[in-house]
Amino acid sequence: MLRRMQTVSEYAMTKNVFTKGQQVALQSRVGLSPRTPMEFTVLMRLPDNQGKAQYRIRNEEQGHERVEQGSNLELTSSVSNA
């Protein structure tokens, strides 16, 4: 039986694993201000919170930073820091 190899983005989406520099969007915006930015850059992974991955993310245009659970993030694109 052949199994298809997962791409990095597929793995990130299924395992909530993101790396510094990746562009992400919030899956759920319930309870957020309409002015909350749509896209963020992952700054770093933080220690898990009750077994759930969490990340510090930032929107460069507005300088808006927040901590969000990996399960509420989706990958939009990947940026290399070359």
Image (tube, rainbow, N blue to C red):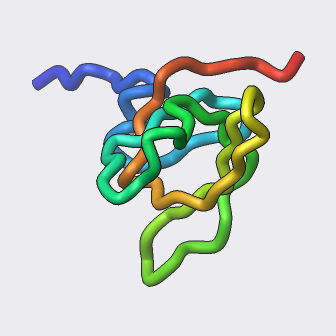
The structure residue drawn at horizontal position 55% and vertical position 30%, both measured from the top left corner, is: 39
The structure residue drawn at horizontal position 74% and vertical position 27%, both measured from the top left corner, is 61
Asked which quadrant contains residue 67, the reply is bottom right
Where does residue 7 sit, x and y in percent of width and height?
Answer: 42, 22
61 vs 39, nearest the viewer: 61
Extreme residue in the bottom direction: 50
For residue 75, side relative to residue 63 (left or right)? left
Q: Dividing the image into 4 quarters, which one contains the C terminus?
A: top right
Residue 45 rendering spot, x and y as whole percentages: 66, 57
Quadrant, the N terminus: top left
Q: Nearer the viewer, residue 67 or 44?
A: 67
57 with respect to 39 (left or right): right
Q: Is residue 68 above or below residue 22?
A: below
Numbered marks: total: 0
* Identity of the residue drawn at 25% across and 20% down: 4
- Residue under the point 74% across and 45% down: 43
Position in image of residue 63 (x %, y %): 78, 40
In terms of image quadrants, where is residue 20? top right
Task: Classify residue 65 as left or right of residue 70.
Answer: right
Closest to the observer: 45 or 72?
A: 72
The answer to whether residue 7 is above or below residue 58 is above
Q: Residue furthest right?
A: 82
Determine the residue located farthest toward the left in the rendered image: 1
Q: Residue furthest front?
A: 34
